Amino acid sequence: MLDVQIRQAATTLLDSAIRIAPSPTREWGHALRGELNYVEGSWAGTMWALGGASVMVKQAIVSLVVPSRAGHDMIPDGGLFARNPHVRRAALALGGACVLAALLFFGAPPFRQAFQVAMQPWLVMYRAATGNLQPGIAALARRAEKQHDAQGLAFCAVRARDAGEGARLAEEAVHLDATLTWVYAIIALAHPGFAHAGTWMGKLERWDPQNGLISLIQAETIVRTRFPHGVWAPPNPAADQAWSEAMAQAFAAPKFDDYFDKFTALNRQVVPRYRFYDPYEVESRWDAGLPDPVTAGCERFAILWIRAGQGLEAQGDLRGAREKYWAVARFGQLIDSQAHSQFERRNGAYLQSLAYRPLEALAKRQGDSAQATLFGYLAEKFNPLKDAPTGESAFGHFTSKRNAAVVEISGLMILVFSGLVLVAAFILIAGSRRGAEAGAQRDKPVATFVALTGALGMLFSAVTLYLTYRPYWYIFQSSVVNGERAQSLDLYELLNSAQMPPGVSPHGFMTLMEALVYSGSPGFLFYVWGGVTLLGVIGLILILLRHFLGRPHAHAP
Amino acid sequence: MKKPRISPETLLVLERFFADPTAWRYGYDLSRETGLKSGTLYPILMRLEKYLLLEAQWVATEEGVPPRHTYRLTPTGLEMAKTVRAEARPRSLVREPAFGNG
């Protein structure tokens, strides 16, 4: 009984394969089918049918690409979709359903965000060309101004790339709501050397008098005056003195707040209110912590302070030396205690490690072994080298980078396949107007094939894009809604990588050899996927060329 | 006339036809004799027929059972098989000492 069923299945398989084979090959299919009756054993019969079916399918595919010598095997009933209009209609219905399903994805906010991320490299180029760098922020600012929404204005102010525009929005926001004064600090940090920021320092000191951040901003402003055009100005003892005083004030401050909590709270209120889901604007650079120049300034001053302490120690002023060391350690603790990113945490740890070593030596010198052991332990614990990035993160959070490449390529593929669907739809519509002409009849199978391939590719790309980006959407949501920063670095890495066109590393275009060396890297993925896609597109173009160039010409009677 | 590419498998098929050049042969029998699967054998038969080295015909069998396709070398095919066999033999003789027992 089972044998009969297996043989029936084998026969059905071969019959189906014969149906899709081009007409010149079908005779051979029937030959294979005829022999099947004489193959002994159900297993051998199945293998025979499978082999025969593979021959028929191969011929069907080849017939689509390579023109036959006769040039008419598609007419009247050759080809995959031409033989049976019902099959063609079913294929078109399936293609239509795929396109509809792919378009429905755009209704989902995660997908829209994913598509925007995929298009980011091209959007950046387009915006740079048109000079409209932040259209989303500009539109949101207009809405907020119209509604006199202080929070909306502050949200835009801290993100505006143009310092003047940011200052204008910030002034307006603070005018409406004085509790938003902190946005001045964010803008001053984001635009070091911005002259207008000097007028805000007094307001910031009055609003948050004990915060060491204000003194750090003042110190950074002084540094900027030393090389206003990127060139280090001649020595200026007065400026150096002012910088040292500002830094000393920061190191002596009883608290340190980089206003990150206020920043995330503002995100939580504004993003849902305006449904503003541009991840590149919401997850702006401030998320990475204090800007590098400010961090470098802290470290430079800490080293100076430690050296000053060692000088005092050499002069026998152990108490003075201890105060200097402690000032550095305490400031490191302050930064560490409120750190929101690994960069800030590392900065705080580094300052502490700088201070605990001399404190250990000083305790030993004073014969306090318990204190010496404690400081030695703390110096080791806060050794920044211990927190050095691992191999994986040094490569740049590989998974997020790879996903960025997948997101970018999937987004591009949606566009490519959409184009194919549109071309095929155009051919089909034009063909239907031409009615029963031979040329129109001939166009239909190829156009159907292209439409179905494009639609399937579109849906596949949409599903890939959605599934790949979905975890990052949740990270974005939890970051915005709950202020949860646990995985924000992954999102940051993905967004950062996706700003480059696929296959391009931040250090330039990755060659094929480099991509092969780092097989599995985004570059490798790009070349593999790019190669497969290119072959697919070339195949489709060949089909179209074969079809339109190889069409039979009318012969004279 | 243009010659088809003669692969070892094609040579195997030609050898079987050459054993009895006038006989009509069935595909399944050829498959069993050469050990080639249908997916390999039929493209070879199709190619040989395309180059007119092989002729095919349908043979009616018992009622209710589909007819069978049978194949035989054409005179051109026979000449071709002779040539190919002659060319292939010296090569195999040269190879033999390297892989043989002696």
Image (cartoon, coloured by chain):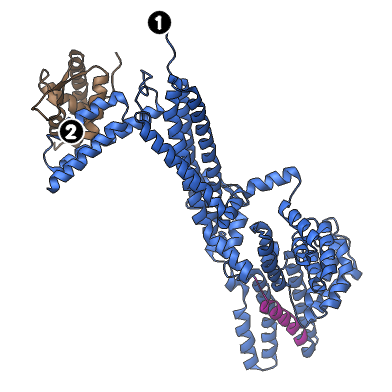
Res. A529 mark: none
Colour brown, chain = B
Does residue A324 show up magenta in the picture? yes
Residue A80 x/y as whole percent: 36, 32
Give the chain letter for blue: A
What's the magenta region? Answer: A322-340
Q: Residue furthest right?
A: A238
Judge whether A538 appears above or below A271 on screen.
Answer: above
Secondary structure of the residue carrying tag 2 is: helix
Please tell me whether residue A261 is drawn above or below residue B13 in the rendered image.
below
Classify mark 1: residues with Cα within 10 Å, few (<14), some (14-19) or many (20+): few
Note whether A199 is above or below A162 in the view shown. Answer: below
Residue bearing the label numbered 2: B97
Between A157 and A74, the one lying in front of the other is: A74
Task: Tell me the SS state at disc 1.
Answer: loop
What is the chain letter for disc 2? B
Let me know if residue A428 appears in the view.
yes
Tell which tag, 1 or 2, sits nearer the viewer: 1
Left or right of A231? Residue B98 is: left
Residue A557: give its label. 1
Is B15 or A328 nearer to us in this picture? B15
- Measured as percent of width and height from the top left, residue A248 is found at 82, 78
**In the shown orientation, is residue A388 left or right of residue A309?**
left
- In the rendered image, residue A156 lying in the magenta stretch gets the answer no
Whole-percent x, y for residue A421 in the image: 51, 37
Indicate the quadrant where residue A186 lies. Answer: bottom right
Q: What type is the residue that disc 2 sits on? A: Pro
Q: Is residue A192 left or right of residue A117?
A: right
